[in-house]
Amino acid sequence: MTTLEELTLTPTTTTVRAACPHDCPDTCAMLVTVEDGKATNVTGDPDHPVTRGGLCVKVNNYPDKTYAPDRLLHPLRRSGPKGSGRFEEITWDEALETIAGQFKARIAEHGPTTVMPVSYLGNQGVLNGLSVGDGFFHRLGATVTERTYCDSGACTAYASTIGATAGVDPESLVHSKYIILWATNTISTNLHLWPIIAEAQRNGAKVVCIDPMRHKTAQRSDWHIPIRPGTDGALALAMMNVIITEGLTDADYVANYTHGYDELVERVAQYTPEWASQETGIPVEDIRTLAREYATSDPAMIRIGVAVERHAGGGQTVRSIACLPALVGAWRHVGGGLLQLPLWAHPVNWPAFMLPELRTPGTRVVNQFLLGQALTGEMELDPPITALMVYNSNPMVVSPEQDKLRRGLEREDLFTVVSDHFLTDTAKYADIVLPATTALEQHDIMFSWGHFYVTLNNPAVEPEGEAVSNTELFRRLSKAMGFDDAALLRTDEELLRDSYDWSDPAMEGITLESLRETGWARLNLPSKDEYAPHAEGNFPTPTGKTEFRSGALEAMGNFVVSLFRQLSDDHQPGGTVDPLPYYIGPRETAEVYPLNLLSPKSHAFINSSAGDQAMQKRVQGEQAVTIHPQDAESRGISDGQYVSVHNDRGRFVALAKISDAVAPGVVVCPMGTWPKNSKDNSTVAAVNPFAFADLGNAPTFSDTRVEVEVV
Ligand SMILES: Nc1nc2c(c(=O)[nH]1)N[C@H]1C(S)=C(S)[C@@H](COP(=O)(O)OP(=O)(O)OC[C@H]3O[C@@H](n4cnc5c(=O)[nH]c(N)nc54)[C@H](O)[C@@H]3O)O[C@H]1N2
Ligand SMILES: Nc1nc2c(c(=O)[nH]1)N[C@H]1C(S)=C(S)[C@@H](COP(=O)(O)OP(=O)(O)OC[C@H]3O[C@@H](n4cnc5c(=O)[nH]c(N)nc54)[C@H](O)[C@@H]3O)O[C@H]1N2
Ligand code: SF4
Ligand SMILES: [Mo]
């Protein structure tokens, strides 16, 4: 490994090992060049087996973000109407006094659940990310926010079928001979996996991409299968039908390591390729070919993207896909099986951050997708929400029902605090705005949901202005509220020590001290050339097998498995769920509005982050909706014209991009654009529904029907 001394150029120049803080599977190891106390450059660590020296377009100018002229550097108090963006600078003491005073007064009048936190994964660090603040709000007795933006439906389905297993090591994909990329635009959203897939491809692997859009990844795949959105479950069930009827199962693997096979055979008999072809729009022969090639190639890999869960039947879709590897014995081989979120391999000490012991059992839970309803009173809440604190999230961009949310945030009687790097469209509605540090200015340690490496983030420079880390923010708030619980006042050093279960076998040989030397380390697991965790079953399910018939769903009905949710197990959705996989089609149909809108990730933004940075805005371009030539022609739309995209929930305006990269009936507009940078102050979130998918309270962003017309 290159030493820091070797990387150091001049005596006043140092190199600091850091980590990209974003909600991205790649969790890159960064090297920060610091000259005279200023960060002047960031690069990827060339020695890191996944980062391989490169950062992506979203982050490779990270010092520009840290030193951006419009960055928030001081606490602010609103001095104009909500949304006007007019603020005046105040001191931290004034800000903390105001917040504590407002929280106390509103709690005295309504009770503690009148306060609601809103946070997600703007920062993904164990210290400053998902659960920072949870202990504070539990101690306060605030409404518990359910966070199910991402993969909670897929995780529930996956865990109900094969257990909370890390699955395949992404690096093992070099050994795969058949790789199905199912609802993932890898080159944009999981860039550092692509060289591994490309290596497998050079070694003879066939790469198949199942996606309604012919994007960068589809273009580089060997076979692109355009599918009608939200119908993937039909395809997976029909693949099982073909595999079973044509005798392509691995009978020995099925007999030893699966549960409920006979019932599965009975169940999938109805899901013929002919039926699935009608649902999915994929020719019958293609469905048969896919099933045959998948069943007869070794090792065969399925990589599922998060987008596979974003429709009414997302949970059952993942259930069906998760059954496939066991049916054909793919798990026997290194590089065979299923890759979803390998985060389950990381022994993060989550309870030390979520602090469930500070929560009062039975405290009210509100899901963040319903924020607009919760704030406008459409959702009956007693007491109402009268104080909101937003950090690590930008709901005006990422939450559905944007118009309703805006109306809620405009409420004069709502006291809103936002902590962020920039004055986002959400922050504009705040009463108090607080400045947050960037990854270059704070301590953290990163798990990964895309590989088996743990990465330490060392601060490279002093914070700009009066910005503080989220950990420091909540220490200050705890003191201002008079909370003296030791757990709420832990220093960053103490939090780092609490971050991982260092005694877990996966951490053997890794300590905080060793990470300070090396920056990152691979978890203590077999190498990518040996790792086949389920070659002999060993699934972490009740039966120890792949459960075609799911004991968990049978016992619990609908529930939520997700690390990204708060620990609130006394509040599960419930209801009965068929324990065998079955088909649920899209909820919104062509009868309502003719076009199916997808809002996948943008290439140059990371969710809404970087959405207001000059370079990234240039690369991403203006908000645009891709529409098929036939649909454009029948509506009199020409390329480059502004169009209105609308339904009963709202509308946004975007540039029309006419292309046959999408099928007729499908339109695509990436999420992440800031409303203020759009033509009509609105984005895809204006038309997205709040409705949940079938499992795990997952979103249904892809289950959005719209009409498009010239403005
Ligand atoms: N550049 C960039 N990278 C990111 C992010 C970002 O914002 N920008 N965000 C990060 C986060 S938080 C996440 S969760 C991941 C998500 O990364 P991905 O899992 O790749 O998710 P998306 O980009 O939303 O969608 C991927 C593809 O799914 C397709 N799709 C949509 N609906 C369906 C469907 O019903 N069936 C099928 N088969 N395909 C469908 C879309 O056309 C899209 O091409 O990316 C991470 N990486
Ligand atoms: N239409 C549509 N909507 C979607 C999706 C979709 O595919 N389509 N995807 C969903 C998914 S998968 C996800 S993961 C969510 C993402 O939702 P969010 O996690 O809310 O994502 P970001 O937009 O990145 O918002 C993070 C905010 O946190 C701020 N931030 C970053 N670091 C820090 C910090 O250290 N401290 C503080 N205080 N703030 C910080 C950023 O500047 C940014 O404003 O969006 C969901 N919304
Ligand atoms: S956003 Fe993802 S790909 Fe880009 S630098 Fe961060 S971890 Fe790497
Ligand atoms: Mo996500």
Image (spheres, helix red, strand yellow):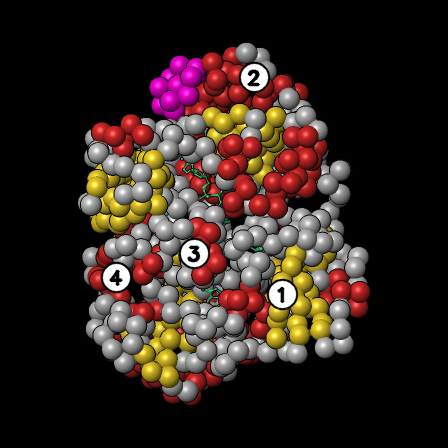
Q: Is residue 176 visible?
A: no
Kind of element beneath mark 2: helix
| Foreground tag (4 vs 2) | 4
| Image spot of residue 538 (x, y percent) | 66, 37
Amino acid identity at mark 4: Arg
Give residue 406's mark. Answer: 4
Residue 282: within the magenta? yes
The alpha-carbon separation of the residues under discs 3 and 2 comes to 44 Å
Give residue 292's mark. Answer: 2
Q: Which residue is mark 3?
A: 617
Q: Which residue is mark 1?
A: 41
Mark 4 and mark 2 in contact? Answer it, CB < 8 Å.
Answer: no
Kind of element beneath mark 3: helix
Amino acid identity at mark 2: Arg
For disc 3, the neighbor class at 10 Å (few under 14, some 14 to 19, many from 20) is some
Report the label total.
4
Q: Earlier in the sequence, mark 4 or mark 2?
A: 2
522 or 77: nearer the eye? Answer: 77
Which residue does the image show at 56% across and 49% down from the upper left? 25
Give residue 369's mark. Answer: none
For disc 1, the neighbor class at 10 Å (few under 14, some 14 to 19, many from 20) is some
The alpha-carbon separation of the residues under discs 3 and 4 comes to 24 Å
The alpha-carbon separation of the residues under discs 3 and 1 comes to 20 Å
Which residue does the image show at 75% across and 43% down from the upper left? 527
Amino acid identity at mark 3: Lys
Amino acid identity at mark 1: Asn
In the image, the segment drawn in magenta is 272-284
Mark 3 and mark 2 in contact? Answer it, CB < 8 Å.
Answer: no
